[in-house]
Image (cartoon, helix red, strand yellow):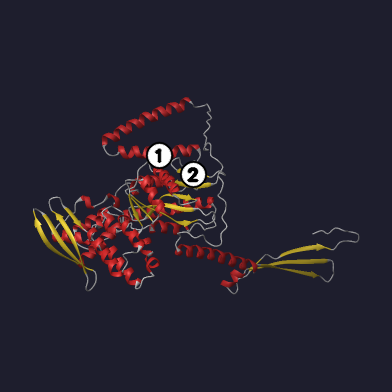
Amino acid sequence: MKEKNPNFFFELQLEEDQSIKLAFWADARSRAAFEYFGDVISFDTTYNTNRYNLVCGSFVGVNHHGQSTLLGCSLMKNEEIESFKWLFQSWLRCMGGNAPKGFLTDQCASMKRALEACMPTTVHRWCIWHIMKKIPSKLNGYKGHADIEQEMSQVVWNSHSKDSFDRNWNDFLLNFGLVDNKWLSDLYEDRHIWVPIYLDHHFWAGMRSTQRSESMHSFFNKYITRNSSLIQFVKQYDNCLGSREQAERESDAADFHTVIPCATKSCIEAQFQDAYTHAKFREVQAQFRGKANCITRLKNSALGYSVYEVGEQVSSSIFNKFVVTYDSVAAEVKCHCLLFESRGILCRHALSVLSFEQVSQVSPRYILERWSKKVKRRHTHIKSSHDEPLMEPRSKRFDQLVFRSQNICEFASESEELTAILHRAYDNIMAEMEALKAKRKGTSSLSHEDANLESVNELQSPPRIRTRGRPKNRLGSKLEKQIANATKKKKTKVLSEVKVMFFKFVAIEFIFLVNSLGNVCVLYFQINLFDAASAAHSNCSQYQGHVMSYQFRVPAAGDNSLGV
């Protein structure tokens, strides 16, 4: 892969027998995409290849359509702190040393300590889905554990300030007699890395769990099974990249050629329609529809700064209240639900206040370039596929020139003066190249271009692990079922093909006809092919071969040969 694309990145840590202990790689397209989608990363290691007992981890970002995009992949023999440190440092080197603003993982102490060492300025978030999923197993020994689970969810999701969360949490522990529960005490100590109200003032591109990484791992199942070799895994991983690339290209094309109509007459909605990708504009429209359930009330106002209370009806008898502030001088609106801060989408409460204030255009700060369909992104010009033959030297040089000239052309097209400079440079270069070509005419020159990487060890596969069933790891049961079903379907398909072949047979009929004189023997050699699969479709479906007639002469006395 490195030979086929110099911008492909990989790092390996090997055992003494040259087998892989740790591996990380990222293709050229993923590295370019990091520039636009590397602000928030989800990392997860719940997938296990099983054949070698290697853990697969993926770095996943969110593109401008809200789709998952792969930004690197790893294979690890263990999940120790030092292994994660090596991996995160390799990933940072790959991405030019630029750490993301937010990093989402599951509740793993080793990852937490490695991240603190490698990315001290990055905000670390635990997957809330994994934590909430543990409630039944951690608290099922208590009476009324179903009520405990429901109340804990209410406290976590419906506390709209840090103070209110602290109060609600303490009340929850007292009401259910859980003050001495160690698991809940530890969770409270770490509340700043998993409770939404402590984290949603940071941008997360809509991510609160590692399910994007997990769904990407389940996506791998379309291409690999747990019995795949490492070489097969790496090749099929590339197919996965190609599939993600195709999905992004199709969405880009839809944004360019089609328009989603506005649901209201609002000029603000039309602003987002013009700027945002279809997927993100639909999210904006969902907030406009939610505005119908909101009642706006002005609490106080002074010097252009107003405080509103927005009541949102979430059921026939329940209203949630949100405080929204609006600064008419700075054209700034803020809601304590923090939807815009965490997802980059203006919430229905803020839109209700803007409508109340009769604002017709929102400030450009609320139209994020992150979700724009108008930005030209460099990674879209780079193919992710590596499963191609090595390019000839001339093709390689051509691709390198196109890549470099593209950036120059984009820069020069900004003004007539820059374009004129580039045209003059092109004329001078063409004259120089033509002179050199004419000078070399009639002579031959040979050049050696080394296409191979130097000093690359012959890598060995790790020893194959024989286990009784699947090893106990953090792989979800849903993923196990998907793998089992895929294997079952494959076996069923093979058996059905064997049955069809079994019923295919050749019936050969030999018919000898001897005429009355006895001097001529006519042999009819007839072949009938019966296809059981074809017969299933049609009662009269039968493939019949050509009828071939061969005449034999009767041998004369003493003639041991037979002529045809």
Q: Nearer the viewer, residue 513 or 48?
A: 48
Q: Nearer the viewer, residue 302 or 537?
A: 302
| In this rendering, position of residue 359 left or right of residue 453 | left
Determine which residue is flagged by label 2: 12
- Is residue 375 visible in the rendered structure shown here? yes
| In this rendering, position of residue 399 left or right of residue 493 | left
- Residue 267 in the image, given as x and y percentages of width and height: 19, 57
Q: Is residue 167 above or below residue 234?
A: below
Please give the name of the residue rendered at 39% of the width and 28% of the height, measured from the top-left corner: 431
The type of residue carrying mark 1 is: Val
- The disc label shown at residue 275, or none: none
Please give the name of the residue rendered at 56% of the width and 72% of the height, measured from the top-left corner: 537
| In this rendering, position of residue 294 left or right of residue 257 | left
Q: Are marks 1 and 2 in contact (CB under 8 Å)?
A: no
Please give the name of the residue rendered at 40% of the width and 27% of the height, measured from the top-left corner: 432
Q: Residues within 10 Å of mark 1 (few under 14, many from 20)?
A: few
- Is residue 343 visible in the rendered structure shown here? no
The quadrant of the rendering that contains the C terminus is bottom right
Q: Nearer the viewer, residue 44 or 536?
A: 44
Q: Quadrant of residue 173?
A: bottom left
Q: Quadrant of residue 120?
A: top left
- Residue 296 in the image, given as x and y percentages of width and height: 15, 64
Among all residues in the image, which is located at the extreme left?
303
- Residue 509 in the image, given as x and y percentages of width and height: 73, 69
Determine which residue is flagged by label 1: 402
Q: Nearer the viewer, residue 106 or 273?
A: 106
The type of residue carrying mark 2 is: Leu
